[in-house]
Image (tube, rainbow, N blue to C red):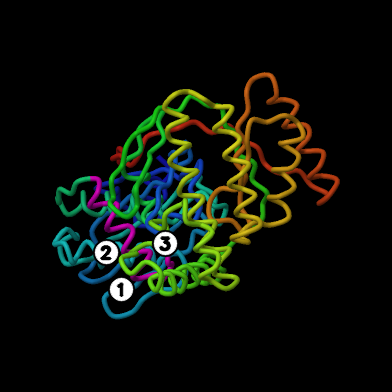
Amino acid sequence: MKASALFRATFGVAPQAAASAPGRVNLIGEHTDYNGGPVLPIAIQARTTVAVGPADAGVLEIVSSRDGSLARIRYTTAFPPGWAAYVAGVMRELAALGAAPAGGGARVAVAGDVPVGAGLASSAALTVAGAKALAALAGARLVPRQFAGVAFRAEHDHVGVHCGVMDQTVAALAKPSHALLIECASGEARHIPFRGRLLLVDTGVRHALVAGALNERRAECEAAVTQLRLELPELDWLAAWPAMRVARLKRALPEPLRSRAVHVVEETARTRLAAELLARGRLKRFGELLYESHESCRRLYQCSAPELDLVVAAAKRAGALGARLTGAGWGGAVLVLVDRRCEARAVVAIRRAFARAYGREPAFSVVKASGGMRKESVR
Protein backbone atom coordinates (compact mmCIF):
# COMPACT_ATOMS: atom_id res chain seq x y z
CA MET A 1 0.00 0.00 0.00
CA LYS A 2 1.38 3.37 -1.08
CA ALA A 3 0.57 5.23 2.16
CA SER A 4 2.24 2.54 4.30
CA ALA A 5 5.33 2.59 2.09
CA LEU A 6 5.48 6.39 2.35
CA PHE A 7 5.12 6.13 6.14
CA ARG A 8 8.02 3.67 6.38
CA ALA A 9 10.22 5.71 4.05
CA THR A 10 9.56 8.93 5.98
CA PHE A 11 9.53 7.77 9.59
CA GLY A 12 11.67 4.61 9.47
CA VAL A 13 9.03 2.40 11.14
CA ALA A 14 5.82 0.68 10.09
CA PRO A 15 2.45 2.40 10.64
CA GLN A 16 0.12 0.95 13.25
CA ALA A 17 -3.19 1.64 11.50
CA ALA A 18 -4.49 2.65 8.08
CA ALA A 19 -7.79 3.43 6.41
CA SER A 20 -9.10 4.67 3.09
CA ALA A 21 -12.14 6.56 1.87
CA PRO A 22 -13.47 7.29 -1.63
CA GLY A 23 -14.02 10.39 -3.64
CA ARG A 24 -17.51 10.93 -4.97
CA VAL A 25 -19.52 12.29 -7.81
CA ASN A 26 -22.90 13.82 -7.14
CA LEU A 27 -25.43 12.56 -9.66
CA ILE A 28 -27.81 15.42 -8.94
CA GLY A 29 -28.60 17.84 -6.13
CA GLU A 30 -26.06 20.66 -6.54
CA HIS A 31 -25.85 23.26 -3.75
CA THR A 32 -28.87 21.76 -2.04
CA ASP A 33 -26.93 20.12 0.79
CA TYR A 34 -26.09 23.23 2.83
CA ASN A 35 -29.61 24.48 2.11
CA GLY A 36 -31.26 21.51 3.83
CA GLY A 37 -32.22 19.69 0.65
CA PRO A 38 -31.57 16.24 -0.86
CA VAL A 39 -28.48 15.06 -2.73
CA LEU A 40 -27.84 11.87 -4.69
CA PRO A 41 -24.11 11.02 -4.78
CA ILE A 42 -22.18 7.82 -5.47
CA ALA A 43 -18.73 6.91 -4.21
CA ILE A 44 -16.13 6.38 -6.94
CA GLN A 45 -13.23 3.95 -7.26
CA ALA A 46 -10.56 6.59 -6.58
CA ARG A 47 -9.58 6.61 -2.92
CA THR A 48 -7.35 8.40 -0.42
CA THR A 49 -5.45 6.27 2.07
CA VAL A 50 -4.06 7.44 5.41
CA ALA A 51 -1.47 5.46 7.40
CA VAL A 52 -0.77 6.51 11.00
CA GLY A 53 1.43 5.84 14.00
CA PRO A 54 2.14 7.46 17.38
CA ALA A 55 4.06 10.73 17.84
CA ASP A 56 4.89 13.19 20.62
CA ALA A 57 1.94 14.54 22.59
CA GLY A 58 0.09 17.34 20.83
CA VAL A 59 2.18 17.00 17.66
CA LEU A 60 1.19 16.02 14.13
CA GLU A 61 3.92 14.93 11.72
CA ILE A 62 2.36 14.81 8.28
CA VAL A 63 3.66 13.79 4.86
CA SER A 64 1.81 13.44 1.56
CA SER A 65 2.74 11.62 -1.63
CA ARG A 66 1.68 14.74 -3.56
CA ASP A 67 4.70 16.80 -2.51
CA GLY A 68 6.79 14.58 -0.21
CA SER A 69 7.47 17.37 2.27
CA LEU A 70 7.21 16.67 6.00
CA ALA A 71 5.34 19.08 8.27
CA ARG A 72 5.56 19.05 12.08
CA ILE A 73 2.64 20.86 13.70
CA ARG A 74 1.56 21.59 17.24
CA TYR A 75 -2.04 21.60 16.14
CA THR A 76 -3.52 22.43 19.56
CA THR A 77 -1.91 25.88 19.60
CA ALA A 78 -1.38 26.67 15.90
CA PHE A 79 -3.31 25.80 12.76
CA PRO A 80 -1.37 24.88 9.62
CA PRO A 81 -2.06 26.19 6.10
CA GLY A 82 -3.02 24.03 3.15
CA TRP A 83 -4.18 20.41 3.19
CA ALA A 84 -2.58 19.66 6.58
CA ALA A 85 -5.29 21.83 8.16
CA TYR A 86 -7.85 19.13 7.35
CA VAL A 87 -5.92 16.53 9.34
CA ALA A 88 -5.43 18.98 12.21
CA GLY A 89 -9.18 19.63 12.23
CA VAL A 90 -9.85 15.88 12.40
CA MET A 91 -7.51 15.53 15.39
CA ARG A 92 -9.24 18.37 17.21
CA GLU A 93 -12.65 16.81 16.62
CA LEU A 94 -11.52 13.33 17.67
CA ALA A 95 -10.03 14.81 20.83
CA ALA A 96 -13.39 16.44 21.63
CA LEU A 97 -15.01 12.98 21.40
CA GLY A 98 -12.29 11.30 23.49
CA ALA A 99 -11.33 9.29 20.39
CA ALA A 100 -7.89 10.76 19.59
CA PRO A 101 -4.62 8.81 19.99
CA ALA A 102 -3.00 8.87 23.42
CA GLY A 103 -1.47 12.28 24.06
CA GLY A 104 -3.12 13.63 20.93
CA GLY A 105 -0.06 13.08 18.75
CA ALA A 106 0.32 11.14 15.50
CA ARG A 107 2.48 10.57 12.48
CA VAL A 108 0.41 10.62 9.31
CA ALA A 109 1.19 9.59 5.72
CA VAL A 110 -1.33 10.34 2.97
CA ALA A 111 -1.49 8.85 -0.53
CA GLY A 112 -4.22 8.36 -3.07
CA ASP A 113 -5.64 9.00 -6.50
CA VAL A 114 -8.58 11.36 -5.86
CA PRO A 115 -7.68 14.48 -7.88
CA VAL A 116 -7.48 17.65 -5.79
CA GLY A 117 -9.72 20.52 -6.89
CA ALA A 118 -11.57 18.48 -9.50
CA GLY A 119 -14.91 18.52 -7.71
CA LEU A 120 -14.57 14.89 -6.57
CA ALA A 121 -14.52 15.56 -2.80
CA SER A 122 -10.82 14.97 -2.22
CA SER A 123 -11.03 16.83 1.09
CA ALA A 124 -13.81 14.56 2.39
CA ALA A 125 -11.88 11.45 1.33
CA LEU A 126 -8.91 12.77 3.30
CA THR A 127 -10.85 13.70 6.44
CA VAL A 128 -12.96 10.52 6.57
CA ALA A 129 -9.95 8.26 5.96
CA GLY A 130 -7.91 10.26 8.46
CA ALA A 131 -10.63 10.05 11.09
CA LYS A 132 -11.00 6.28 10.71
CA ALA A 133 -7.24 5.66 10.79
CA LEU A 134 -6.59 7.92 13.78
CA ALA A 135 -9.53 6.48 15.72
CA ALA A 136 -8.18 2.99 15.02
CA LEU A 137 -4.80 4.09 16.36
CA ALA A 138 -6.56 5.24 19.53
CA GLY A 139 -8.57 2.04 19.80
CA ALA A 140 -11.78 4.08 19.66
CA ARG A 141 -15.02 2.66 18.24
CA LEU A 142 -17.15 5.09 16.27
CA VAL A 143 -20.09 4.37 13.98
CA PRO A 144 -19.98 5.54 10.32
CA ARG A 145 -22.18 8.58 10.99
CA GLN A 146 -19.81 9.72 13.73
CA PHE A 147 -16.89 9.55 11.30
CA ALA A 148 -18.91 11.60 8.82
CA GLY A 149 -19.62 14.17 11.54
CA VAL A 150 -15.98 14.42 12.60
CA ALA A 151 -14.91 14.91 8.98
CA PHE A 152 -17.64 17.49 8.30
CA ARG A 153 -16.77 19.60 11.36
CA ALA A 154 -13.06 19.40 10.56
CA GLU A 155 -13.68 20.97 7.15
CA HIS A 156 -16.53 23.32 8.06
CA ASP A 157 -15.61 24.52 11.55
CA HIS A 158 -11.82 24.37 11.48
CA VAL A 159 -10.75 24.85 7.85
CA GLY A 160 -13.59 27.26 7.10
CA VAL A 161 -15.18 25.72 4.01
CA HIS A 162 -18.92 26.35 4.28
CA CYS A 163 -19.78 22.94 2.87
CA GLY A 164 -22.73 20.68 3.53
CA VAL A 165 -22.71 17.13 4.86
CA MET A 166 -22.96 15.28 1.53
CA ASP A 167 -19.31 14.51 0.81
CA GLN A 168 -18.45 13.18 4.24
CA THR A 169 -21.68 11.17 4.52
CA VAL A 170 -21.24 9.32 1.23
CA ALA A 171 -17.54 8.72 1.93
CA ALA A 172 -18.51 7.02 5.19
CA LEU A 173 -21.76 5.23 4.21
CA ALA A 174 -21.52 4.40 0.48
CA LYS A 175 -22.48 0.94 -0.80
CA PRO A 176 -21.27 -0.65 -4.07
CA SER A 177 -23.67 -0.42 -7.04
CA HIS A 178 -25.86 2.10 -5.19
CA ALA A 179 -26.36 5.83 -5.01
CA LEU A 180 -27.10 7.38 -1.63
CA LEU A 181 -30.10 9.69 -1.31
CA ILE A 182 -29.29 11.98 1.61
CA GLU A 183 -31.88 14.35 3.05
CA CYS A 184 -29.45 16.86 4.46
CA ALA A 185 -31.84 18.61 6.88
CA SER A 186 -32.71 15.40 8.72
CA GLY A 187 -29.64 13.31 7.94
CA GLU A 188 -31.84 10.49 6.65
CA ALA A 189 -30.02 8.39 4.04
CA ARG A 190 -31.32 5.69 1.72
CA HIS A 191 -29.40 3.49 -0.73
CA ILE A 192 -30.81 3.55 -4.28
CA PRO A 193 -29.76 0.88 -6.84
CA PHE A 194 -27.82 2.44 -9.68
CA ARG A 195 -27.42 0.61 -12.98
CA GLY A 196 -26.36 3.44 -15.30
CA ARG A 197 -23.07 3.80 -17.17
CA LEU A 198 -21.20 6.99 -16.33
CA LEU A 199 -18.24 8.76 -17.84
CA LEU A 200 -16.35 11.37 -15.86
CA VAL A 201 -14.82 14.09 -18.02
CA ASP A 202 -12.17 16.04 -16.11
CA THR A 203 -11.70 19.45 -17.74
CA GLY A 204 -8.46 20.10 -15.85
CA VAL A 205 -9.82 23.40 -14.52
CA ARG A 206 -9.27 23.49 -10.78
CA HIS A 207 -11.14 25.43 -8.13
CA ALA A 208 -10.30 26.52 -4.56
CA LEU A 209 -13.40 26.24 -2.41
CA VAL A 210 -12.26 28.37 0.52
CA ALA A 211 -11.07 31.21 -1.70
CA GLY A 212 -13.75 30.72 -4.34
CA ALA A 213 -17.41 31.54 -4.65
CA LEU A 214 -18.89 28.72 -2.54
CA ASN A 215 -18.91 30.75 0.65
CA GLU A 216 -20.43 33.68 -1.24
CA ARG A 217 -23.24 31.50 -2.60
CA ARG A 218 -23.97 30.13 0.85
CA ALA A 219 -24.21 33.68 2.23
CA GLU A 220 -26.63 34.58 -0.55
CA CYS A 221 -28.81 31.59 0.29
CA GLU A 222 -28.83 32.52 3.98
CA ALA A 223 -29.85 36.06 3.05
CA ALA A 224 -32.67 34.66 0.91
CA VAL A 225 -33.97 32.61 3.85
CA THR A 226 -33.93 35.69 6.07
CA GLN A 227 -36.08 37.62 3.58
CA LEU A 228 -38.40 34.69 2.83
CA ARG A 229 -39.24 34.31 6.51
CA LEU A 230 -41.27 37.49 6.12
CA GLU A 231 -43.50 35.41 3.81
CA LEU A 232 -43.16 32.06 5.62
CA PRO A 233 -42.04 32.56 9.26
CA GLU A 234 -41.56 28.85 9.93
CA LEU A 235 -38.99 28.46 7.11
CA ASP A 236 -35.79 26.88 8.44
CA TRP A 237 -34.09 25.87 5.18
CA LEU A 238 -34.19 27.36 1.70
CA ALA A 239 -34.88 23.90 0.24
CA ALA A 240 -38.04 23.69 2.38
CA TRP A 241 -39.76 26.46 0.40
CA PRO A 242 -42.72 24.78 -1.40
CA ALA A 243 -41.99 24.14 -5.08
CA MET A 244 -45.55 25.15 -6.04
CA ARG A 245 -44.89 28.63 -4.63
CA VAL A 246 -41.90 29.56 -6.81
CA ALA A 247 -43.82 32.50 -8.31
CA ARG A 248 -44.34 33.92 -4.83
CA LEU A 249 -40.65 33.41 -4.07
CA LYS A 250 -39.67 35.33 -7.20
CA ARG A 251 -41.81 38.30 -6.17
CA ALA A 252 -40.31 38.31 -2.67
CA LEU A 253 -36.61 38.35 -3.58
CA PRO A 254 -34.32 40.70 -5.54
CA GLU A 255 -31.54 39.44 -7.77
CA PRO A 256 -29.23 37.60 -7.32
CA LEU A 257 -31.01 36.08 -4.33
CA ARG A 258 -34.02 35.24 -6.51
CA SER A 259 -32.01 33.14 -8.95
CA ARG A 260 -30.08 31.36 -6.20
CA ALA A 261 -33.28 30.46 -4.37
CA VAL A 262 -35.14 29.28 -7.49
CA HIS A 263 -32.25 26.96 -8.31
CA VAL A 264 -32.25 25.43 -4.82
CA VAL A 265 -36.03 24.93 -4.68
CA GLU A 266 -36.29 23.43 -8.17
CA GLU A 267 -33.12 21.32 -7.73
CA THR A 268 -34.64 19.90 -4.56
CA ALA A 269 -37.67 18.69 -6.52
CA ARG A 270 -35.47 17.37 -9.35
CA THR A 271 -33.32 15.35 -6.97
CA ARG A 272 -36.21 13.60 -5.25
CA LEU A 273 -37.74 12.78 -8.63
CA ALA A 274 -34.36 11.52 -9.87
CA ALA A 275 -34.11 9.06 -6.96
CA GLU A 276 -37.58 7.71 -7.80
CA LEU A 277 -36.64 7.32 -11.45
CA LEU A 278 -33.42 5.47 -10.62
CA ALA A 279 -35.26 3.12 -8.29
CA ARG A 280 -37.57 2.24 -11.24
CA GLY A 281 -34.71 1.97 -13.74
CA ARG A 282 -35.94 4.88 -15.89
CA LEU A 283 -32.54 6.10 -17.05
CA LYS A 284 -33.73 8.13 -20.05
CA ARG A 285 -35.91 10.46 -17.97
CA PHE A 286 -33.23 10.52 -15.27
CA GLY A 287 -30.74 11.74 -17.88
CA GLU A 288 -33.06 14.57 -18.90
CA LEU A 289 -33.01 15.78 -15.30
CA LEU A 290 -29.20 15.90 -15.43
CA TYR A 291 -29.36 18.31 -18.37
CA GLU A 292 -31.96 20.43 -16.56
CA SER A 293 -29.79 20.53 -13.45
CA HIS A 294 -26.74 21.72 -15.38
CA GLU A 295 -28.70 24.48 -17.09
CA SER A 296 -29.96 25.68 -13.72
CA CYS A 297 -26.43 25.64 -12.31
CA ARG A 298 -25.21 27.60 -15.32
CA ARG A 299 -27.98 30.17 -15.56
CA LEU A 300 -29.39 30.60 -12.05
CA TYR A 301 -26.63 29.60 -9.65
CA GLN A 302 -23.84 30.78 -11.98
CA CYS A 303 -21.45 28.09 -10.78
CA SER A 304 -20.47 26.60 -14.12
CA ALA A 305 -17.48 27.41 -16.33
CA PRO A 306 -17.06 27.59 -20.13
CA GLU A 307 -15.17 24.29 -20.21
CA LEU A 308 -17.97 22.53 -18.34
CA ASP A 309 -20.66 24.02 -20.58
CA LEU A 310 -18.78 22.93 -23.70
CA VAL A 311 -18.56 19.31 -22.52
CA VAL A 312 -22.28 19.19 -21.65
CA ALA A 313 -23.28 20.68 -25.01
CA ALA A 314 -21.05 18.29 -26.96
CA ALA A 315 -22.41 15.31 -25.01
CA LYS A 316 -25.98 16.35 -25.74
CA ARG A 317 -25.35 16.79 -29.47
CA ALA A 318 -23.78 13.31 -29.56
CA GLY A 319 -26.87 11.71 -28.03
CA ALA A 320 -25.73 11.13 -24.44
CA LEU A 321 -28.63 10.40 -22.08
CA GLY A 322 -27.60 13.20 -19.74
CA ALA A 323 -24.72 15.36 -18.56
CA ARG A 324 -24.05 17.92 -15.87
CA LEU A 325 -21.26 19.47 -13.85
CA THR A 326 -20.48 17.67 -10.62
CA GLY A 327 -18.81 18.95 -7.47
CA ALA A 328 -19.92 22.55 -6.79
CA GLY A 329 -18.72 23.86 -10.16
CA TRP A 330 -16.44 26.76 -11.17
CA GLY A 331 -14.23 24.11 -12.76
CA GLY A 332 -13.66 20.42 -12.23
CA ALA A 333 -15.52 17.65 -13.98
CA VAL A 334 -18.66 16.75 -15.93
CA LEU A 335 -20.64 13.58 -15.42
CA VAL A 336 -21.99 12.04 -18.65
CA LEU A 337 -24.67 9.33 -18.62
CA VAL A 338 -24.40 7.07 -21.67
CA ASP A 339 -25.61 3.79 -23.06
CA ARG A 340 -23.55 1.38 -25.12
CA ARG A 341 -24.86 2.77 -28.41
CA CYS A 342 -23.82 6.39 -27.85
CA GLU A 343 -20.74 6.04 -25.63
CA ALA A 344 -18.04 5.99 -28.32
CA ARG A 345 -19.75 8.74 -30.30
CA ALA A 346 -20.00 10.95 -27.20
CA VAL A 347 -16.33 10.48 -26.31
CA VAL A 348 -15.20 11.42 -29.82
CA ALA A 349 -17.49 14.46 -29.96
CA ILE A 350 -16.35 15.79 -26.59
CA ARG A 351 -12.68 15.29 -27.39
CA ARG A 352 -12.95 17.07 -30.73
CA ALA A 353 -14.96 20.00 -29.39
CA PHE A 354 -12.67 20.47 -26.39
CA ALA A 355 -9.50 20.26 -28.50
CA ARG A 356 -10.84 22.83 -30.96
CA ALA A 357 -11.69 25.25 -28.16
CA TYR A 358 -8.74 24.75 -25.80
CA GLY A 359 -5.98 23.00 -27.74
CA ARG A 360 -5.96 19.93 -25.49
CA GLU A 361 -8.14 16.97 -24.61
CA PRO A 362 -9.92 16.40 -21.28
CA ALA A 363 -9.32 13.25 -19.26
CA PHE A 364 -11.96 10.49 -19.42
CA SER A 365 -12.69 7.75 -16.92
CA VAL A 366 -15.52 5.30 -16.33
CA VAL A 367 -17.26 5.75 -12.99
CA LYS A 368 -18.67 2.84 -11.00
CA ALA A 369 -20.60 3.19 -7.77
CA SER A 370 -18.23 1.95 -5.09
CA GLY A 371 -18.08 1.36 -1.34
CA GLY A 372 -17.30 3.77 1.47
CA MET A 373 -14.53 3.99 4.06
CA ARG A 374 -12.68 0.89 5.18
CA LYS A 375 -9.68 -0.23 7.21
CA GLU A 376 -6.56 -1.05 5.21
CA SER A 377 -3.70 -3.44 5.90
CA VAL A 378 -0.51 -1.79 7.15
CA ARG A 379 1.71 -4.41 5.47
Q: Amino acid at mark 1?
A: Tyr
Q: Amino acid at mark 2?
A: Met
How crowded is the residue under tag 2: few (<14 C-alpha within 10 Å), some, or many (20+)? many
In contact (CB < 8 Å): disc 2 and disc 3: no
Mark linked to residue 75 = 1
Q: Nearer the viewer, residue 184 or 95?
A: 184
Mark linked to residue 194 = none
Whole-percent x, y for residue 74 in the image: 30, 75
Q: Vertically, is 338 above or below 254? A: above
Whole-percent x, y for residue 115 in the image: 54, 50
How crowded is the residue under tag 1: few (<14 C-alpha within 10 Å), some, or many (20+)? many
Residue denoted by label 2: 91
Residue denoted by label 3: 238
Q: Nearer the viewer, residue 323 or 249?
A: 249
In contact (CB < 8 Å): disc 1 and disc 2: yes
Residue 379 seen: no
Q: Nearer the viewer, mark 2 or mark 3?
A: 3
